[in-house]
Image (cartoon, rainbow, N blue to C red):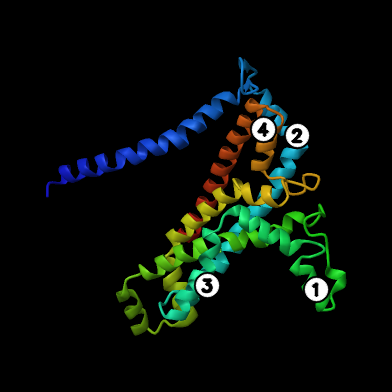
Amino acid sequence: MNASYVRRFVVLSLTPAILVYALFVFVPVIWSTYYSFFDWKGIGAAKYIGLKNYVEIIHDPIFWRAMKNNLIFLVVSVFGQLPIALVLAILLHKSNALQRFIRSAVFVPMVLSSVVIGMIWQYIYHPQIGILNFLLDKLGLESWKLQWLSDTKIAIFALAPPLIWSFVGLYLIIFISAFQNIPGEIHDAAQIDGAEGTRKLISITLPMIWTTVQIAIILCISGSLKSFDLVYVMTKGGPAHGTELLATYMYNSTFSSYRYGFGSAISTSIVLISLIFIGLSQWITNGKTKA
């Protein structure tokens, strides 16, 4: 088949998807960036104010509280979800009935609504009827019983388990697919060379799927920096902004205060911050690969 014909076919096949993606992703980002330079209430004329929205963001302590909480989410995502998913993938990458059942069970939270997940964990953390405090009471650990979602010092950390539980299944499937795509000849060669167990995992398997790990890190970073629904369902950013994230900060500033220009500046900042962290992650992981 003619190579130019194949290229034209590929371009024509991808064009509709690219146009739809651009319409619903790139255009809103550009539009939001445009309005970030205006004082706009959502209706009426927009007043150009330059960088004043961004200056206000920088001087707003709630923004920095949200940024700190998002960094906690980022660390939890990268160093919580990915290692757990990787270990499970190593244990469950074969395809017997038990392993398929466990994989399906781990993946179940991915098909649940974030509202449902938030409500489940609200009941788990409930100070009176929650199963967590009930178990601590039965184990004689009454001093460990806390107001999990009402204490500003621990609320953001209490959101870490549901965050991890929600997305481990996604990365488990990604890593299992990567393991299964390693050619069988590689495993045979490793066995002939005497590479087994941990040595084979570190020297052969992980380097072979390192590109997949990099992609998973990008997904973790972008997902943690735009986290919204789970937090909004469970705490709405409270108490006293203790679980405020950049996305909830943007939502409250936009739709509660009707400051669409200011909210657009926050959303643009989230995009820029995401790009910075993704760039840093790629620089670090690429450097590790070269090393």
How packed is label 4: few (under 14 Cα within 10 Å), some, or many (20 or more)?
few
Q: Which mark is residue 255?
A: 4
- Please tell me which of labels 4 and 2 falls first in the chain: 2
Gap between marks 3 and 1 measured at Cα: 27 Å
Which of the 4 image quadrants contains residue 24?
top left
Gap between marks 2 and 1 measured at Cα: 39 Å
| Type of the residue with mark 1 | Leu
Frontmost residue, 31 versus 178: 31
How packed is label 1: few (under 14 Cα within 10 Å), some, or many (20 or more)?
some
Where is residue 217 shown, x and y percent of the image?
52, 56
Q: Which mark is residue 60?
A: 2
| Type of the residue with mark 4 | Phe
Residue at point 66%, 32% (across, down): 254
**Labelled pair 4, 1 in contact (Cβ < 8 Å):** no
- Please tell me which of labels 3 and 1 falls first in the chain: 3
Residue on which the image places disc 1: 136
Where is residue 91 shown, x and y percent of the image?
49, 77
- Which label sits in the foreground, 3 or 1? 1
- Which label sits in the foreground, 4 or 2? 4
Where is residue 3 shown, x and y percent of the image?
16, 46
The extreme right residue here reads 143
How packed is label 3: few (under 14 Cα within 10 Å), some, or many (20 or more)?
many
Q: On screen, 281 above or below 168?
A: above
